[in-house]
């Protein structure tokens, strides 16, 4: 697997990505998890705390319903995405 590094000060973000992809066709662009979590994680700490507080108020039945709902929605979306890719 390859990592594509974008150069600083080389134009807009879109053009840097396009340039990087031309220079390394077929490369997989993957974030570095430690860097991603270090930069993005703190932004979501408050949201995570609020969600955890809310989830504590739900009954087991409500949590079960929510889990099933999200799992089915993900399956429906996955099936639709696969269908669109075939067209």
Image (spheres, helix red, strand yellow):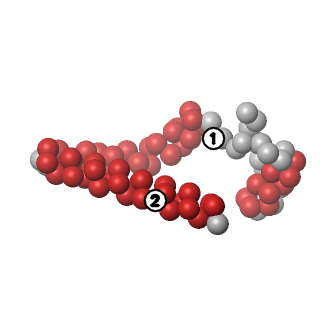
Gap between marks 2 and 1, in whole Å? 24 Å
From the top left corner, tell me how far across and down residue 5 is, in percent: 76, 42
Number of callouts: 2
Residue 82 in sight from this viewpoint? yes
Mark sitting on residue 64 = none
- In the picture, which quadrant includes the N terminus? top right
Tell me: residue 5, above or below residue 11: above
Residue 7 in sight from this viewpoint? no
Residue at the spot 35% in from the left edge and 54% down from the top edge: 72
Q: Is residue 9 left or right of residue 67?
A: right
The answer to which of 57 and 40 lies nearer the viewer is 57
Residue at the spot 74% in from the left edge and 38% down from the top edge: 3
Mark 1 Cα-neighbour bin, 10 Å: few <14, some 14–19, many ≥20: few
| Secondary structure found at label 1 | loop
| Secondary structure found at label 2 | helix
Residue at the spot 28% in from the left edge and 50% down from the top edge: 68
Q: Is residue 5 left or right of residue 50?
A: right
Which residue appears farthest toward the right when viewing the image?
23
Q: Is residue 4 left or right of residue 34?
A: right
Residue at the disc numbered 1: 31
Mark 2 Cα-neighbour bin, 10 Å: few <14, some 14–19, many ≥20: few
From the top left corner, tell me how far across and down residue 64 is, in percent: 21, 47
Residue at the spot 49% in from the left edge and 55% down from the top edge: 78
- Mark 2 touching mark 1, by CB under 8 A? no
From the top left corner, tell me how far across and down residue 8 is, in percent: 78, 49
Q: Quadrant of residue 14?
A: bottom right
Q: Is residue 21 left or right of residue 65?
A: right
The answer to which of 10 and 24 lies nearer the viewer is 24
- In the picture, which quadrant includes the C terminus? bottom right
Residue at the disc numbered 2: 77
């Amino acid at each position: 697997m390859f990592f594509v590094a974008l150069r600083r000060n080389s134009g807009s973000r879109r053009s840097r990505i396009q340039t990087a992809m031309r220079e390394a066709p077929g490369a997989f662009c993957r974030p570095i998890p430690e860097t991603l979590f270090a930069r993005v994680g703190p932004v979501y700490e408050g949201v995570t705390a609020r969600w955890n507080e809310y989830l504590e108020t739900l009954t087991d039945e409500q949590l079960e319903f929510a889990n099933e709902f999200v799992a089915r929605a993900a399956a429906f979306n996955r099936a639709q995405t696969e269908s669109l890719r075939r067209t």
